Image (spheres, rainbow, N blue to C red):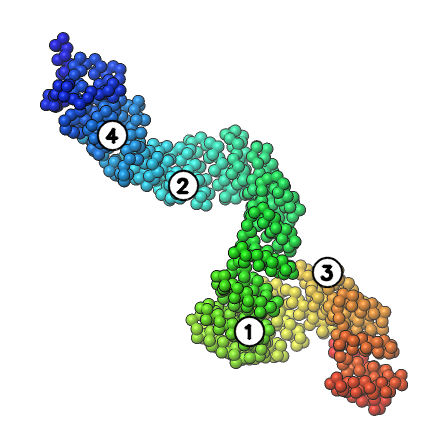
Amino acid sequence: MKMRSLLAFRKIPAPFLLRCLINYKPFCSHCRFPKESENPSQLVSGSASDQNPVTSEVRLLTTKPVQKDESDLIDVLLYRKENPISALRFYNWAKPWRGSFEAGDAFWVLIHILVSSPETYGRASDLLRRYVSSSNPIAMPSVLVSNLVDSAKLYGFEVNHRAFNYLLNAYSKEKQTDYAVDCVNLMIELGVIPFVPYVNSALNALVRRNSINEAKELYSKMVAIGVAGDNVTTHLLMRASLREQKPEEALELCSKAIERGLEPDGLLYSLAVQACCKTLDLGMALGLLREMKEKKLCVPSEDTYTSVIVASMKKGNMEEAIRLKDEMVSDGIPMNVIVATSLIKGHCKKNELGSALDMFHKMEKESPSPNNVTFSVLIERFSKNGDMEKVLEFYKKMKVLGITPSDFHVHSIIVGCLKGQRSEEALKIFDESFETGQANIFICNSMLSWLCKQGKIDEATDLLKKMESIGIRSNVISYNNVMLALCRKKNMELARTVFSKMLEKGIKPNNYTYSILIDGYFKNHDEQNAWEVLDQVTSSNIEVNEVIYHTFINGLCKVGQTSKARDVLKKLIKGKRFCISCMSYNSIIDGFIKEGEMDSAVAAYKEMCGNGISPNVVTYTSMMDGLCKNNRMDQALEMKHEMKNKGLKLDIPAYGALIDGFCKKCNMESASAMFAELREEGLNPNGAVYNSLISGYRNLGNMEAALDLHKKMLQDGLRCDLFTYTTLIDGLLKEGNLFLASDLYTEMQAVGIVADEIMYTVIVNGLSKKGQFAKVVEMFEAMKEKDVTPNVFIYNAVIAGHFREGNLDEAFRLQYEMLDKGLVPDGVTFDILVSGKVGKPQPIGVANL
């Protein structure tokens, strides 16, 4: 018996035995004995202490000592390291009396012991998490990792990667993302392989808080040590790339994962499909979707279907989008608002408004309910089509559904109503925007612009005050609108006052502001004030651009000061004040042509080309028009050839100028050839072109051709103007075709065109030639009723008629009436009244007038 006890005692290591003897006290001296449940001597089955006969000595080691000594605890833990559960029980039992050991090595020794056995892996992980969560502040990874490494070296443990990974997991679970990332980096430095699921937790946290670059950097370090992750890792990084709008990068991640041998799952397919949709590679997206379904990995998600449908719509493949929508519904996924809105948008783009409305009504009756975007699509499309009735209907439905129209909605609806002549609705919605607080500077400026165009200056200035009263600060555009309206009304004094108020409010004028004032002064023939504005802007800090200088040059040209405008332009070119474009030269060329200085216009054109400025279509059109009007058709045709050689296409005005030139020369063959060329170019002639041709054929007396052109004009959907009817009626009356001339006059009145002095002159002349004096008098009285003053020719025709009829008193009365109206009788009047020479009426036509 003694021998067995001695042998058992010898199993205790010498240091333990020594401490046991030093601290030995009889059992009665202990404060209490450990309860059965917390007695660390009750080890797992098969442990040495279960069979140790010297239990009193073993228990001596586990009772409360007189003084705390962490080394005692460490020694016992090391003694029990082969039995991790026993070590844990002992640690937990000793902790209440010996105080907290987490600050010392005992805790880390215990962790090393626990991670040595699969049976206690979970206990080690839980302890580390509790340790991290209870630390205040949470200990940095550099400290805890050092504790693990140092304790392993000090107490002879092999470095177990689980301890570090459990620490990493503890940081992740406690949402200490930065510490988790630091922990991974330290592990990599130590050559410890992090567990992929724990790294995924850190990556997920980084992606969630949008630290995507940091997530990618961490992943790159993992790849560098040969740990590329699993499907979850790939999912996380693909989502991050998609969030960054880098679909190509997401597809590359997917491709590399498959190359490494990862078997793609349903989510990987879904993300790849979405990435393809972002790149609008619809073919690949559809192929992946089909492959995903064939493999029966999972039913494509709502997001996946939505992505493919939206991509199909962006590619304009409406049929494919509808097919996918039907497939989505057949898979048990209800159509969502994004899909429905995309389909509505597709129908709108194809102008299939009926189908778009059908889809919308289906959303209203069933589901999904239309949202703000749905209404935006419909409002935008119907506004472009000018169907403001429908737009207002959508606006009202939004309010019924409790959807607050956005500022954009309100603005576009107001602008649409104003364009569609529905000012009452526009003003009502505008007033509502103030009540709801949606009124902003864009909405107010649009209303200001409309009020100013309508000439409602008082309302515009009231609106400026109202804006300021509710905190909407007017800007330079607001004041420009008001100034422009005042300049159009030629109220330059008030325009200048508004300009001064703008400066007082600290609003900086722009180039357009000064251009408005300069243009206004020139239109009022106030050249001096226009110069003053130019001097003011050039001496200010504003960067003067081409708009101001062009407005000034154009203004000089408009008031007949083209030579002076050319001098100003030369000075600007010499001083390199701004980059000269063809706009200013076009104004100068046009000014010279209108002043009858064709040679100066040609010189300006040559100067323009010499300065390296390329003429545009407007330049050539002005030059051709001027040359044609000056009977220089050869030079005009040279311009045409030069224009074509430079790759510029003639427009309608350019062709019109040439056609008119040929018609005035009665060269109808060349005019008709030019008209045919215009048609071949795919251009549609306008009323001016038709009028030139009709006038040309009338001058040649070819009324059949003129009337054929009149019919073609109507077939082209063009409305004949007063000039057209005057020319045709003049030609028909010259031929003596009173019946057809009368029909055209009736047609002209039916379409609302009112005859002017020239028309009445033509008719009176034609009727006089045919001896239709009664109708002449009738037309003469009609002119008076319509407040059209007859000219001298018409008075002469009526006076001559009365003279023939013997109504001398009436003839002389009409002479006095002429004088009262400020008309000066001519030689013909004198011959009739004094000499009695009535003779035949002198032939007169539109061209003569």
Between marks 3 and 4, how big is the CA–CA gap? 92 Å
Asked if 596 appears above or below 475 in the picture, the reply is: below
Quarter containing the N terminus = top left
- Residue that numbered label 1 is attached to: 519
Q: In front: 265, or 702?
A: 265
Query: 392 left or right of 610?
Result: right
Between marks 1 and 2, how big is the CA–CA gap? 58 Å
- Residue 169 point in image, percent of width and height: 33, 33
Query: 66 left or right of 391?
Result: left
Between marks 2 and 3, how big is the CA–CA gap? 63 Å
- Residue that numbered label 2 is attached to: 208
Looking at the rendered image, the disc whose residue lies closer to the viewer, 2 or 3, is 2
- Residue that numbered label 4 is attached to: 159
Looking at the rendered image, the disc whose residue lies closer to the viewer, 2 or 4, is 2
Indicate the secondary structure of the residue bearing disc 2: helix
For marks 1 and 2, the one nearer the N-term is: 2
Residues under numbered marks 2 and 3 in contact, where contact means CB atoms less than 8 Å apart: no
Image point (78%, 70%), residue name: 728
* Identity, as a three-letter code, of the amino acid under mark 1: Asp
- Residue 205 point in image, percent of width and height: 38, 39
| Observer able to see residue 480 | yes
Q: In front: 514, or 44?
A: 44
Indicate the secondary structure of the residue bearing disc 4: loop
Residues under numbered marks 1 and 3 in contact, where contact means CB atoms less than 8 Å apart: no
- Residue that numbered label 3 is attached to: 717
Question: Quadrant location of residue 315?
Answer: top right
Looking at the rendered image, the disc whose residue lies closer to the viewer, 3 or 4, is 4
- Residue 565 point in image, percent of width and height: 54, 77
Between marks 2 and 4, how big is the CA–CA gap? 33 Å
Query: 507 left or right of 53?
Result: right
